[in-house]
Image (tube, helix red, strand yellow):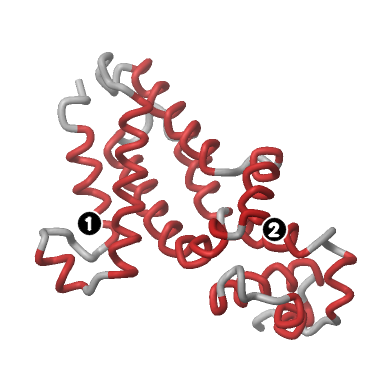
Amino acid sequence: MPTRPSDQPMRQRIVAAAIQVIRERGVTRATTKEIARAAKVSEGSLYNHFENKTALFGAAFGEVTSGIRGAMRELATSVGSDTVEGNLGRLASAAIRFYGELLPMTGSALADHEVSAWLRRRMPEQGGGPIQGHAALIAYLEAERETGRLARHADAPSIAAALLGACLQHAFLSLLATPAAMASVGLPNDVDEYARRVVRSILAGHLP
């Protein structure tokens, strides 16, 4: 039987409601009143779980990033197994889907100086944030280089930046361009196909 909202722990319900409202309204237009209504709790009860609205929004963003964090953890345990191309392809697919979910939420968040400052300060403290993800990918690439499965001359930071940047670009275009427009410039709409092609191109010349 599916879990009803009232059966979920209150903090979890509030975070889920915040994600829903931010997606629908954007950070700058999302209100605690709407979030409380969506969570089916009183507005005052939000502050029993979060110090302020900014902290609530930070928790919502943290929840959205949980999927990509899981993909990064899986990548870290994949050193020396399967193939580098296959491992990076799976990560790229997860990253594209993550960016596709995150971009609509973060547009207004980045324009809100209080929220963006909170995210810059608190996400690293909680083991998250874009730099941590980038660093995790670099660590994986460096470990594969040590095993000999990546060429000794491979520049891990640049490869990581190229891969994550390509993932972000696909998510961005998918939100603003039609499938026909993407196809017209040779970009597949299918996330997994795009991920495989990008990884193959980026690794060209970097495999032994």
Give, as a three-letter code, the residue at label 2: Ala
The structure residue drawn at horizontal position 30% and vertical position 42%, both measured from the top left corner, is 86
Q: Give the x, y percent position of residue 64.
A: 57, 60
> Image height check: is 29 above or below 174?
below
The circle on residue 59 is: 2
Query: What is the crowding at mark 1: few (fewer than 14 residues within 10 Å), some, or many (at least 20)?
Result: few
> Image height check: is 201 above or below 193?
above
The structure residue drawn at horizontal position 62% and vertical position 54%, both measured from the top left corner, is 113
Residue in the foreground of this view, choosing between 145 and 112: 112
Query: What is the crowding at mark 2: few (fewer than 14 residues within 10 Å), some, or many (at least 20)?
Result: many
Relative to residue 113, is residue 195 drawn left or right? left
The circle on residue 180 is: none
The circle on residue 193 is: 1
Q: Secondary structure at mark 2?
A: helix
Relative to residue 22, is residue 4 drawn left or right? right
User: Which quadrant of the view contains residue 161?
Assistant: top left
Which image quarter holds the N terminus? bottom right
Q: Give the x, y percent position of residue 170.
A: 29, 57
Relative to residue 195, is residue 97 drawn left or right? right
Which comes before the other along the chain, label 2 or label 1? 2
User: Which quadrant of the view contains residue 208?
Assistant: top left
Relative to residue 201, is residue 192 drawn left or right? right
The structure residue drawn at horizontal position 30% and vertical position 38%, both measured from the top left corner, is 162
Eye-nearest disc, 2 or 1: 2
Q: Secondary structure at mark 1?
A: helix
Give, as a three-letter code, the residue at label 1: Glu
Q: Give the x, y percent position of residue 12.
A: 74, 67
